[in-house]
Image (cartoon, helix red, strand yellow):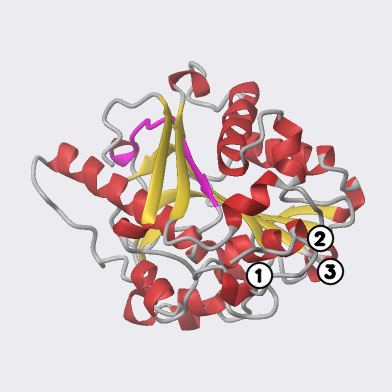
Amino acid sequence: MKTDPKKTMTRRQFIRDTSVAAAGGALLMSSGSNVLAQMIPTAKSDVVLIRDKDVLDGDGAPKANVVLSMLDQAVGKLTGKKAPLEGWKTLIKPTDVVGIKTNVWSPIGTTSQVEEALKSRVMGAGVAEKDIAISDRGVLRDPVFARATALINARPMRTHHWSGVGSLIKNYVMFVSDPYNYHEDACARLGEIWTYPIVKDKTRLNVLVMFTPQFHNVGPHGFSPRHVSKYYGLIVGFDPVAIDTIGAKIIGGMRKKYFGEERPVSPSPTHIAVADTKYGVGNADPAKINLIKMGYDVESFC
C-alpha cells in the first residue's frame, strides 16, 4: 500500500508505538522524507544501543561532547540522516513546544550532560528556548509542559523496589497527580499513563541512560556503589517498551555476572510486557525488536 505523505497518520497505523506516532504525524506533513518511509508500520521496533568507553571522565562524570556525539549517531541511525541536525529536524519542528522529561533521583540521574545535549539539538531544530522545558517532578506545574506538543523522555535505568526496574515507561508516572496509586501489582498500570491525553502520541524520542546503571538494590530507595556498573551506553529509539525490554535484559546480565548465577530482579518488571499486551504502547516481544548496536561491544549482555 502506498503512503501519501500529505495525509496524517493515525496512532493505530504505528504498531503499538506511541513514541513514533507524534513524530510520524509531523513527518507526514513534509514530502520526500526518507525517514517517513522508515517509520511506515513494520513488525519490528528499531532500538539503537550505542556505547563509548570514552563517555566518562576520570571522576565518572559524562563528557558533554561525547554524550552529544552518541545521541547524534543514534538519531542518525534511526532516521537515516547523516548530518546531525537533519536527523533531529525529522523529529522536532520549529513550531513545537518541547518538554524534556528527565529523572532527578540523586544517586543516578539522567545527568545534566544528557539534558543539555537534548536541549541543544531541540534548539538546533528551530525551537525557541522559551518553548523548551526540562523537568521531572514538576511537570504538572510547568507552564511549558502544559502546552507541550512534543516530549522527549530520558532517564537512567536502575532496579526498583516497586516496579522491578525504573524504566522509560515508569518515567511518565510524574504526569499523574497520584503516582502512589500505580504501585499495585509491581506497577502493572504504568503503561496506562501513556494513553492519557497529557502524553498520548507526543513522545518523539526515548533515551535510556546506561552510563552507570544500578543492577541491584535493597529497599525503596536503596543505593550502593557496589551495585553500579560502568556500561558507557545509551539506548535510543521511538518505542519505550522495546527499549525497556533491552534495558531489563542488560540488567539481568549484570546480575548474573555479579552474583555468579541467575538471580532475577524482584519484583519482576512485568509492567513492561503489560504496556505492550494491555495498553499497546510498544513491543515487548524480543522477536519484534530490531536491536542495532553501535560502538563498544564488550559484555553488552544483549
Q: Please tell me whether residue 157 is drawn above or below residue 7 in the rendered image.
A: above
Nearer the observer, 285 or 234: 285
Q: CA distance from mark 1 to mark 2?
A: 16 Å
Q: Is residue 299 magenta?
A: no
| Residue 185 seen in the current view | yes
Amino acid carrying label 2: it is: Met
Q: Quadrant of residue 140?
A: bottom right
Amino acid carrying label 1: it is: Asp
Kindly state the secondary structure of the residue where label 1 is placed. Answer: loop
Q: Which residue is mark 1?
A: 201
Kindly state the secondary structure of the residue where label 3 is placed. Answer: loop
Q: Which residue is mark 3?
A: 147
Q: Which residue is mark 2?
A: 29
Residue 229 picture location, percent across and down: 33, 34
Kindly state the secondary structure of the residue where label 2 is placed. Answer: loop
Residue 88 picture location, percent across and down: 72, 42
Residue lying at 36% horizontally and 59% vertically, measured from the top left: 288
Instruction: Name the N-terminal-most of marks 3 and 1.
Output: 3
